[in-house]
Image: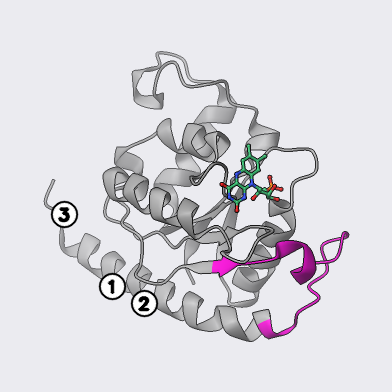
Amino acid sequence: MAKIALIVGSVRSDRQGIKVARWIEKNLVNRNHVVFFIDPLELKLPLLDRMYKEMAHPSDKLQFLRNQIKEADGYLPITPEYNRSTSSAMKNTLDYFLEEYYFKPSAIVSYSPGVFGGINATQQLRLVFAELGAPSIPSSFSIPRVHTVFSNEGRLLDESYNERVVRFFEEFEWYIEALGKQRKIGVPY
Ligand SMILES: Cc1cc2nc3c(=O)[nH]c(=O)nc-3n(C[C@H](O)[C@H](O)[C@H](O)COP(=O)(O)O)c2cc1C
């Protein structure tokens, strides 16, 4: 069992990403993980002015989010691809924090309506998570033609995904366990 911060990357009213996020959440819960479901649409964080650590009086909402980011054993961003990169909503949410992420792994899920499944966003997001101190695991999980994988109501139409995603979770869990053990021994800074 691990605590996993799942971060939704879209706030669009017609967002496809919420279907991916709810499906991933369900799979993680089925694997006995605790999921912190972080949705920027609900959070409505302003564009970054001060980072959390620079705030004298962070809001309750931000303190709650900070505790989730700090407490998580790993991060699972679910990113759309906007202009060959991740979304501003994803980046803005991540940028509020830094040390809270340190020495924990991330595993990136992406999706798009086209055939590439948002891999350009994944590549960009790898750089961000490296800088945050939560390097991404070697595998990523991309979902091409996302409109055909889920129904409008968010039901999984392509059952093969339930099997495909298992290897990705297993790899993520390996890194969560490995880095968790090492953090208990100590961290370099
Ligand atoms: C501003 C913007 C830029 C986009 N740029 C890309 C892109 O570079 N590559 C791509 O495959 N799809 C691109 N798309 C299509 C999105 O991947 C598609 O709309 C997807 O559903 C977005 O995720 P969301 O519905 O969860 O917001 C773009 C969409 C928007 C709104």
Q: Which mark is residue 178?
A: 1
Regarding mark 2 in the picture, which secondary structure is present there?
A: helix
**Residue 40 location, x and y as percent?**
62, 37
Q: Which residue is mark 3?
A: 187
- Chain part drawn in magenta: 142-160
Looking at the picture, does residue 67 appear above or below residue 31?
Answer: above
Name the amino acid, label 2.
Trp
Q: Does the numbered disc 1 mark a residue whose Cβ is under 8 Å from ligand 1? A: no
Looking at the picture, does residue 24 appear above or below residue 82?
Answer: below
Q: Residue at x 69, y 36 (%)?
A: 41
Closest to the observer: 184 or 30? 30
Neighbours of disc 2 within 10 Å: few (<14), some (14-19), many (20+): some
Q: Residue at x 74, y 46 (%)?
A: 15
Q: How many marks?
A: 3
Q: Which mark is residue 169?
A: none
Task: Give me the C-alpha separation between circle 3 and circle 1.
Answer: 13 Å
Q: Does the numbered disc 2 mark a residue whose Cβ is under 8 Å from ligand 1? A: no
Q: Does the numbered disc 3 mark a residue whose Cβ is under 8 Å from ligand 1? A: no
Q: Are marks 2 and 3 in contact (CB under 8 Å)?
A: no
Regarding mark 1 in the picture, which secondary structure is present there?
A: helix
Q: Are marks 1 and 2 in contact (CB under 8 Å)?
A: yes
**Residue 60 location, x and y as percent?**
57, 26
Q: Residue at x 32, y 48 (%)?
A: 127
Left or right, 62 with respect to 123, comes to right
Q: Which residue is mark 2?
A: 174
Neighbours of disc 1 within 10 Å: few (<14), some (14-19), many (20+): few
**Residue 6 location, x and y as percent?**
56, 54
Q: Residue at x 35, y 49 (%)?
A: 129
Neighbours of disc 3 within 10 Å: few (<14), some (14-19), many (20+): few
**Residue 184 location, x and y as percent?**
23, 62
Closest to the observer: 184 or 161? 161
